[in-house]
Amino acid sequence: MHELGIVFHVIERVEEIALNNELEQIERVTLQIGEVSGIVDHYLIDCWDWAKKNKSE
């Protein structure tokens, strides 16, 4: 399941962008994923929800 690694990379990148733009809150993240990426969408969503929950604790 490489979706978790992708989620961690996206979170790191979003945090970097937020820091560079002096943002305190991120309201939404939208990803465009290609058909041949090999990513299983519901795995990615589950990993995102897990990471979001554990990041705020």
Image: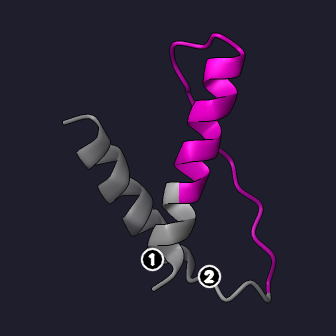
Residue type highlighted by circle 1? Tyr
Question: Whole-percent x and y of residue 38?
Answer: 67, 89
| Residue 32 horizontal side relative to residue 51, left or right | right
The residue lying toward the viewer, choosing from 10 and 28, is 10
Question: Whole-percent x and y of residue 24?
Answer: 52, 12
User: At numbered mark 2, what does the secondary structure look like: helix, strand or loop?
Assistant: loop
**Residue sitting at 36 percent across and 46 percent down?**
52
- Check the picture and name the quadrant holding the N terminus: bottom left
Are the residues tagged 1 and 2 within 8 Å (C-beta)? yes
* Looking at the image, residue 49 lies above or below residue 21: below
Rate crowding at label 1 as few (under 14), some (14 to 19) or many (20 or more) other CA atoms within 10 Å. Answer: some
Residue type highlighted by circle 2? Ile
**Residue sitting at 49 percent across and 57 percent down?**
8
Q: Can you tell which mark lies on residue 39?
A: 2
**Residue sitting at 55 percent across and 27 percent down?**
27
Rate crowding at label 2 as few (under 14), some (14 to 19) or many (20 or more) other CA atoms within 10 Å. Answer: some
Question: Whole-percent x and y of residue 56?
Answer: 27, 34
Q: Which residue is mark 1?
A: 43
**Residue sitting at 61 percent across and 20 percent down?**
19
13 in magenta: yes
* Looking at the image, residue 14 lies above or below residue 19: below
First to last magenta residue range: 9-35
